[in-house]
Image (spheres, grey):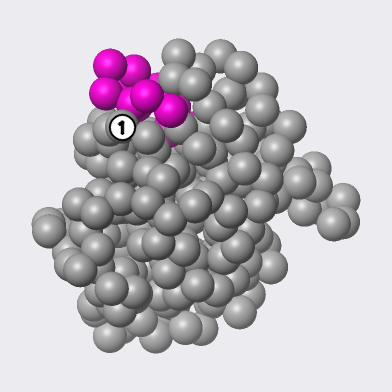
Amino acid sequence: MGFYDRHILPRLIGAACAQPDIDAQRRKVVPHAEGVVLELGFGTGLNLPHYDPAKVSRLYALEPSEGMLTRARTAAQASPVPIDILPEPAERLSLPDGAVDTVVTTYCMCTIPDVRAALAGVRRALKPGGRLLFCEHGLSPDPKVQRTQRLLEPIWKPIGGGCHVTRDIRGLIAGAGFRIDQVETGYRPNAPKWAGFDAWGSARPV
């Protein structure tokens, strides 16, 4: 891991993902988590203020980035919810089958190298009847915006830590064996359209 990935990128991602419009999106999904929770891409713990300690008994915080882990551990120390940090890739999730009640993923599916493998692991780790709560940005339905996304993605990926802006979030979730219970979509008001088309909602394993 180079200097940029270890020292610069975590600060950039932390600042970008702490913007008020993104925080407002987090508030739409994270408070619905309950029981034993797995969060993919814990980062600097920006979702922590939105968990309800009365509903969440334990949080497994998965964070594979060495540059993020120091910040993740600092955030975990101040959490009212018991946290176990999992310093591992989402594609190689170590939790046993049926270990969690809820999986939370916010603005991290864009950077997971093999997102299909990660979702397969999520499905395996969820208990029967468990729920996936998601809020992710990805491919716009507007062909003009799509063209911009495809043009900019090769430039943006190395700057944004491997962030893909052309992933079809709903298609990926459904293709991984989930039934989407509810979903909303829209552009965040303070983001460029090529980076700001969000899909948020919940899904359950079929």
The quadrant the N terminus occupies is: bottom right
Q: Is residue 33 above or below residue 126?
A: above
Which range of residues does the magenta coloring cover? 46-58
* Residue 3 x/y as whole percent: 87, 51
Element under disc 1: strand
Q: Is residue 73 above or below residue 69?
A: above
Q: Residue at x 35, y 81 (%)?
A: 146
* Residue 197 x/y as whole percent: 31, 62
* Residue 195 x/y as whole percent: 42, 63
Left or right relative to 71: residue 7: right
Residue 48 within the magenta-colored segment of the rendering: yes
* Residue 154 x/y as whole percent: 61, 79
How many marks are shown on the rendered structure? Answer: 1
The residue beneath circle 1 is 35
Q: Residue at x 59, y 71 (%)?
A: 113
Instruction: Say which amino acid is labelled 1.
Output: Gly
Relative depth, front residue between 75 and 153:
75
Q: Residue at x 12, y 57 (%)?
A: 182
Relative depth, front residue between 173 and 17:
173
Q: Residue at x 66, y 22 (%)?
A: 74
Left or right relative to 56: residue 90: right
